[in-house]
Amino acid sequence: MSGVLETLSFLRDPDFARSRFESYGDVYGTTLLGQRTVFIRGEKAINDLFAQGDAVEGWWPDSVRKLLGPLSLANRNGADHKARRRVVGQLFAAAALKRYSPAIVALVDDLNGELLADAAPLALVPKLRRFAFSVIASTVLGLDSVDREVLFVDFETWCQGLFSLPFALPGSPYARALQARQRLLRCLGAVLEKAQRDAAAGAPLAAGGLDLLAGGLDEAGLPLSDDDVTEQLLLLLFAGYETTASSLSCLLLSLLQHPAELAWLQQELDGLPWPPAPGEAGTAYDSSRAPRLDAVLKEVMRLAPPVGGFFRRTRGPIVLADVLIPADRVVQVSITASHRYASGNEDLEVFRPQRHLAGGTKVTLLPFGGGERVCLGKALAELEIRLLAVGLLKQLTLALEPDQDLTLRIIPSPSPKDGLLVRACRR
């Protein structure tokens, strides 16, 4: 069987995995577009997978693999993947985030100004997506607002095709994404070329992170071609953007739908400074100083993780939760289903941030994936989310507009279908 109908259901049904887990157990097999696939959930099966890392490799659906490109870090395995990941990871290390923080704070204040300037109901999701994209494009690539806007339009088109059916029919999301990819690579190539010219002339790099990337490549002895580097930059944009935009949208949606929890959080935020003291943005709102904010973020990412699942392919037979999985099977780790599944009487369908205080839950959270291929942009995303949550909620009051569809569109990441219509006023 080709699994076409199963694939369509996988792409369209947000309850696809959970309904099948309830019928078949925590490890079950199916076919998605001709590929034998095993879905897993729960701590036992996932920990077994992580413990057998040498027996599996990274895998993505054809649409993702082709849109990311053959040279992308996401499509590499083994020592080649590990070496490049160490280098690219420097862009999201603590020292790099400290460099980026002032620009992120400024972008939060800019967003607040935009929201206050619009008296009519506004769609918050597009604003949050532009904010998240502006952060990664300005801090890592050093792009100004004009260049960011040009890149943003194509990047949105590219993202919409990532988890579509990989058929390049004229006008299809996948065909449009392939065309956008070529434009993005040309633009990123121009950014890289300018950075190389500036470096050769002894001028400081405009981008906050490109010098870290270049220095790390030299140190590791990885002579990458320009095409190779531009594909890594494309991946970095996605790693630092899509998951963050989704988490920001789901955070504000959850709080606006639960005013009691918002008021509970607001009590803590009232005691926190904005902006953070110079050089302290990375720790000003961490779990030790803002435990309620930390609990809210964990609960949002439990119920609506920005990455609903991730894939591995077995190189040989492995055992997951006492089930033998043959070689050449794709294993799909269902994060969303795992976050809502635990033994005991805990009600995991309810939004209750307090469960994460003082060890109140046994759920293992994997909102950005896990293992050696955990999302590269995780640290930047967490910093952005904390900064925006404090900077926005301390200064603005948001009110949901009635009669809108607040259900989540799942692909490529969760986001309210009607764009989260709100009215904003100064708090």
Image (spheres, rainbow, N blue to C red):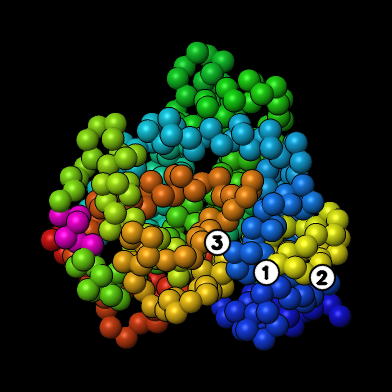
Q: Position of residue 380 (x, y in %)?
A: 44, 44
- Say which of marks 2 and 1 sits in front: 1
Q: Which residue is mark 1?
A: 40
Observer-nearest residue: 209 or 333? 333
Q: Position of residue 334 (x, y in %)?
A: 61, 68
- Helix, strand or loop at label 3? It is loop
The Cα atoms of the two marked residues, 3 and 2, are separated by 22 Å
Q: Position of residue 166 (x, y in %)?
A: 74, 66
The Cα atoms of the two marked residues, 2 and 1, are separated by 13 Å
Of labels 3 and 2, earlier in sequence is 2
Relative vertical location of residue 389 with respect to residue 139 in this rendering, above or below:
below
- Say which of marks 3 and 1 sits in front: 1
Q: Which residues are magenta?
A: 265-270
Query: Are the residues tagged 3 and 2 within 8 Å (C-beta)?
Result: no
Q: Residues within 10 Å of mark 3 (few under 14, many from 20)?
A: many
Q: Which residue is mark 2?
A: 36
Q: Amino acid at mark 3?
A: Val
Report the residue at 64% width, 21% height from top.
218
